[in-house]
Each structure stands twice: as C-alpha cells, then as structure tokens.
Amino acid sequence: MSAPAAAQQDDERAASPTGDDSGAGSGSALVAPKDRKVRPAWLQARLAAAIAAQPKLARARIAIAVVDLSTGAELFARDADVAQNLASNAKLFTSVAALATLGGGFRWHTAVYADALDDATGAVAGDLYVRGRGDPTLSEKHLQDLADDVVARGVRTVSGRLVVDASYFDGELDPPHYDEQPNERAGFRAPVAAFGVARGTVTLTVVPEPGGSAKVRLDPQSDAVRLGKTEVTTVSDAATRIAIDAKPKRDHLELSVRGQIRVRDGSYERRFRVDDPARVAADVLRKLLVDRGVKIAARGNATGTVPERAVLVATHDSAPLALVVREMDKQSDNYIAESVLKTLGAETRASPGPATWADGTAAVRAYLATIGIANVRADNGSGLFGASAASARQLVAVLRAAHADYRVGPDLVAALPVGGVDGTLAKRWHGHAAAGRVRAKTGTLDKVITLAGYAGWGGDRVLAFAVLVDDIPAGQRAAARALGDVVVDALVAYLEP
C-alpha cells in the first residue's frame, strides 16, 4: 500500500497541465475491428499492450477491471482482486451507499428555536438555539437567509444566549486518517461538525490596490481566525508572490501575510481549515442577527441541546442529496464526502445519540453487503490519505449495482465528471472520441492515480471500468494518468458502432 501522501486530492482539478493530457501515443482516432466478434480479443490485446508500453510503471501496482453492463461479461481483468488504495475513488462507495440508503431526495435541515417567544413584543425569554444537522453546503449566504427569517418571524430581543446544538454528530471533528498529516492547514483537510459554514474553512483573499498596499480580508469573519501582520505590496509588472504563515494560538488561528501581488492578477485566494467549525458558524450567525437589529443579552455563544419545549422559529433546508453528491464528485470535495459519511451514520445508527465516524463506515459496509461485497476498507468518506483498500473488481461491482438500480444509477451518472466537459475531467480527452462519452471519478495521491466510472456510446452499450495504479515511482504520476487515458480511448473505440 502506498505511504500516506502529501495530500494531493484537492489538486485533481489541476491534474492536466495542458488542454489535452490524454496520453502520448493514444491517438484520437483509435479504431477497433469492424467485426464485433473479434473486438473482445482486440480490446484485451490493446489494454495489455498499453500496460507494457509504460516501462516507467514497471514497479507500480496496476489493477484493471472492465465489465460490459449489457451482458455482464468481464472484458478485461488484471490483478482485479488485489486490494489497493483508491484515493478519491473511495467517494464512489460513499456516493452510492448514501444514494441507496438515504435516497436522492434527502435534505439536511438547519433550524433556529427559542425557549419562548412573545409574538407581540418579539422578545425571546431565555435562549435562542441553532441546531445543525450536518449540512455540508451551508454557506454564509444561507445563514443570511436564516437570519432574515428569524427577523421576519418577529424576534427582536433575546434575554439569554445564542446556543449551538451540534449533537447530531459526536465531538470527533477530524475524519479517520486525517491525523496522518496533523500540521496541514489547507482547506482540503477541513474538520466536520454538525453545524459549520463555508465547509469548515476560512478564505484569505488579497486584492491589489494600485499605488499602495494590498487589501487582505478573511471570509467568513470570526474571532476563531484572525489576521496578524499583513505586509503585501501592489506591483505593476513583477510576478505575484504571496507567503502566508499560519500560527495556532491559544484561542484562535493567526494568519500573517507578506509579499507582493500584481495588479492585473486581480486577486489571490487560499483556504485554510478552522479548528472549531461550530464556533465560526455561530460567530457568523450571531453577527448577522445583530446586524439585523436583534439584541442578544449574553455575550459569547454556548453549546447545548434544543429543549423539547422549544419553539421553532426558522429553518433552512439544503439542496437534495442528489445535487449535493453531484457537487461532491464533480469537484472531488473531501468535506462534503466526510459530511455525507457521518450523516449516513446518524441516519442509520441503531441507538439514539451523536453519530460517530464508525457509524458512518458501518453504514457503507452494510450497503456493500446488500450487493455482495465484503472485505472492503473505506475508513473515511473521501479516500484521503491511507484510508482505503479495495480491488478494481469490487469498484466495478459497485458501479454495476448502481447502474442496475434506477433509484441510484441516474443520480450517480449525473454526479460523475464528464470527460472533456466538466469537473476533474474537464481537461481530459479533448479531440478524442472519449470526450463526452466517459463519466468517471478520478483519484490522486502522491503515489496513487485511479480512474473509475462508465464509458458508453449509445444507450444500449455501457462499460463499467476501474483503473488503479498504486506505488507509483517518484515523478511518474503523469505516466499513470496517461495509462488511464489509453484505457479509456480503447474502451470507447471498442464501443463505437
């Protein structure tokens, strides 16, 4: 198994440095024999030759499985039962398990309650509560809408505190294996709480100001993340060079910025994980309420649970799961994947109480068992770090099961990046027959490249495939990616009428 990687998954969108990285020598006009009877043998020979043509990957572990979903025939297999690190292809397990278990129409609900509300005066006697239910897409704009609804309901004063109820999840914020890179502050490694905003991150933005120092701001704003020294100058011709120092303090994270930014670059942005996402979200909501004239007597925010007697004041519902999974897979979003995993745990756990990461992974295993898959290791929802071990054949089996279930398959297909069109595959296969005919999930770690999904020409012929390359020698990730491109070109040629 590959060693835990310097987390590369968040960089999948930039995996192809040029407009077409579909593999040297793969050819955009690959043609299979006209006689369909000999095409299976042609495909096997073509894929075997593609592997042999990558001597730089001789020491890598390569596993491939291809199945014709219309007939169930396995068209190609190489080390297809060997468990390997899936990287972000682990999100396929999370996606399919969630769609099958919760349904594409599942929504997350964020709600505000009051101990007691006098409709005549708008006075809340006691505390105002916000209860999170793990919405991974909750944004500052959504909290603005929620604050507007609180005011529209008539709330004007709160005699007590703003209380956060994040008890839907337990207090273990970091998903399993995130501790393999404990000092990483980047946004792809954000913690997960039942109440969080901006995907558990803060964005630092630098904007050039002609003739002076650049402006630096943080969004969303919270005492949990503060600016230290900001020494960024605006330049006309020199290249942008920004250095950011992130220092954890006793009660906050301090970000100091220095360097220069070129005027025509417009702006510079970087996301950082926050350590207490519920605190940040509460700070944002409190400020929004105060800005709208709501007076909250007690300073600071508290944690607790909503009493049964509390009065519902306002709610915000997320987009349906089918659309959230689409956002998750198109952009390979780790935060959404981990939130979905823990939500699975919350919705399926047998006893009352906050959901744990173990509840989430148990729910995935339970779904896999219903389709005959066992002995898969998916320790978190995103596949980040050394969290997964599954075979190419198992991955194809999940794709096959989803395709056969009309409650799941259409939403999964819609969620996958389209080759040459969008998501993490936007820059692949331009000018090739595969463009627009392949929907697949990418996976990228330091020593791992994976690609799995569907290839189709007409509606009646669809192939499910998985290409897993592990233990990639240093500097050879491009070769591993090119192998996946050659495989896809061959699959599409095989399908061409």
Image (cartoon, helix red, strand yellow):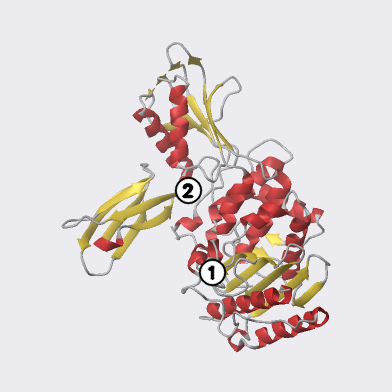
Say if 143 sits above or below 99 in the image.
Answer: above
**Residue 200 numbered tag:** 2
Q: Where is residue 86 in the image (x, y as percent from the top left)?
A: 64, 66
Q: Is mark 2 on a helix, strand or loop?
A: helix
* Amino acid at the residue labelled 1: Ala
Seen in the image, is 489 located left or right of residue 38? left
Instruction: Please state if 366 lies on the left or on the right of 296 as rendered.
Output: right
Residue 259 showing in the rendered view: no
Looking at the image, the residue that sits furthest to the top is: 120
Q: In which quarter of the image is the N terminus?
A: bottom right
Closest to the observer: 377 or 247?
377
Of labels 2 and 1, earlier in sequence is 1
Q: Where is residue 336 in the image (x, y as percent from the top left)?
A: 56, 51
The label shown at residue 5 is 1
x%, y% of residue 102? Answer: 70, 44
What label sits on residue 385 in the rendered view? none
Q: How many tags in the picture?
A: 2
Identified at 52% across, 45% down, the residue is 137
Report x, y in % for residue 91: 63, 58
